[in-house]
Amino acid sequence: MEIGLLLTSVWLGILTSISPCTLTTNIAAVSYIGQKVGKPYYVMLSGLFYTLGRTTLYTILGLVLSLSFSSIPIVSQFLQSNMPYIVAPSLIIIGLMILDIIKIKLPNFGFGLNKSNNDKRGLLKSFVLGVLFAMALCPVSAALFLGNLIQTQGNVLSLILYGIGTGLPVIAIAFILAFSVKNIAKVHSKIVVFEKWARRITGIVFVAGGFYYLSTILGINLNILSWFTFLADYVVYDMLAIAKNLPLASALHFFIEDVTKIFFLLFLVTGFVSFFRSYLNPEKVREYLENKPKWLAYLIAILLGAVTPFCSCSSIPLFIGFIEAGIPFGVTMSFLITSPLINEVAIVILAASLGWHVTLIYLATGMIIGLFGGLIMEKFHMEKYVESYVYNIRMARNKIIQVKETLTQRTKYAVNYSFEIIKKVWPYILLGVGIGSFLHGFVPSEFMSEYLNKESLFAVPASVLIGIPLYSNAIGIIPIAEVLLSKGIPIGTVFSMMMSVVAISLPELIILRKVMTTKLLSYFVLLMFLMIILMGYFYNIIL
């Protein structure tokens, strides 16, 4: 049995334990276990025996169901030959039940929350209580149990781990009861919030897994990115009938495939991220960062920079807000540096174009530059060179756009925001893909590798200088980087050009001049120039 399936069993068990109806019975169990709070080890043993009771019931029930079906020849043969057809709809239905879209009322066999169960004593009775409460099924807990049974095909170890998972929160709460009673209310409130999101994510995973199985049965290609290759093939080779060996065919194919792919991913990922970002209140972010440990503040600033939109122009309002809130200058600069270098859409497109190994290297590089850039600028006390008006600004709370809390309004906001981003960046995408197409189709690999190879000492500084007069965002520069890497240009040289274009290009510096004095801007450019070059040389040496 794969470790992933075993871990999934534990996860489904935990999710079962904090689902609404099971959480109610677990609270009843906690109230019984906590009656002898003055004896901490007894309380812990009671929680363990309660978990053992739940584990026993779920293991026996799973084995009975599994063996019953497999022992009947007709049923066993039917299952062996039709299992994919059973698994696909089952996962979809179970996922919909977990999401509470399909509602089925199940009997609880009389084992609900009542006083008689709470009045019992002894470790053995804790075990019995676990068995009885495990029988109090509801649609969500039944769906999770069946989901585990189906995905592991009745494996004994997975059934035991699932049972243990259903009792883990009770053990955790028993520990808190035994050693820190005052925290119990706080833990319960966090469990309720966690359960809601965890259940939604798990339900979506089940539904997605069901549709994946279904697509496998029906022979549908779910590699969506390959559809854009087929589209480019059809347009270039079938509709236009251009010979494959011509440079024009190669360039046009690259242009059609990358433009359609990038716009699709841009809309999809931007909409998805902006939907969840609508829950993020900038005011609360600033308040949260205040008085936090430096290492945590830097980490949050870098992560926040990675999910803000595309360029410094959209990050400057938050930059001003951070300065006004008294957040350390280095933390603020880490945010401002990371923001143009990394964004969620560029990461997805970069992974789709160049693979995850290159993407992870670029992601780590951007975060390292953001971290050390902020640390160095704070070390040399460069905050005194920020434009003086920035410190006098008071960002009115009512100016911060708040997204409505309803699901429909959040979805509408995400869709509209995606279209707004596309309107802003489409010229840079077309320009970047156009340049990449020309390089891909008409410029020989030998020409580039001759002047931009690892042995060339000036290749990395030259690539940085080439990027400064240009202006694009990380998305627009990716097609060019894709071509350069395919032509054999070293990864350090390519990354250096990418980062100079998005971080220290002339239009970008003009935007930053709004909040920085000329002196600070000069130090910023020099620091970024040196850090990008050092990173470029480093990657060219080790890769």
Image (tube, grey):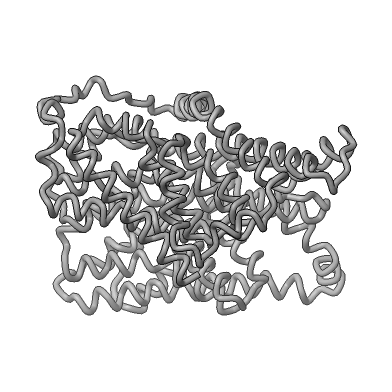
Using the image as rendered, state which of residue 234 and residue 196 is in the foreground: 234
Residue 67, picture quadrant: bottom right
Residue 359 location (% of width, % of height) = 51, 56
Q: Is residue 189 visible?
A: no
**Residue in the image at 39% along x and 33% along y:** 278
Nearer-the-camera pick, 335 or 193: 335
Q: Quadrant of the N terminus?
A: bottom right
Residue 248: image x %, image y %?
A: 78, 39
Q: Is residue 313 above or below residue 222?
A: above
User: What residue is shown at x 54% (from left), y 70% (from top)?
Assistant: 58
Residue 319: image quadrant is top left
- 433 vs 233, left or right, is left
Q: Quarter-wise, where is residue 239 in the image?
A: top right
In the picture, measured across the screen, residue 273 lies left or right of residue 299, that is: right
Rendered position, 91 above or below 284: below
Q: Residue at x 13, y 42 (%)?
A: 383
Out of 251 and 322, give the one closest to the viewer. Answer: 251
Q: Nearer the viewer, residue 230 or 245?
A: 245
- Left or right: where 130 falls relative to 423: left
Q: Residue at x 38, y 53 (%)?
A: 366
Residue 57 placement (x, y as % from top left):
52, 72
Residue 387 at least partly seen: yes
Q: Position of residue 517 (x, y in %)?
A: 18, 33
* Left or right relative to 213: residue 51: left
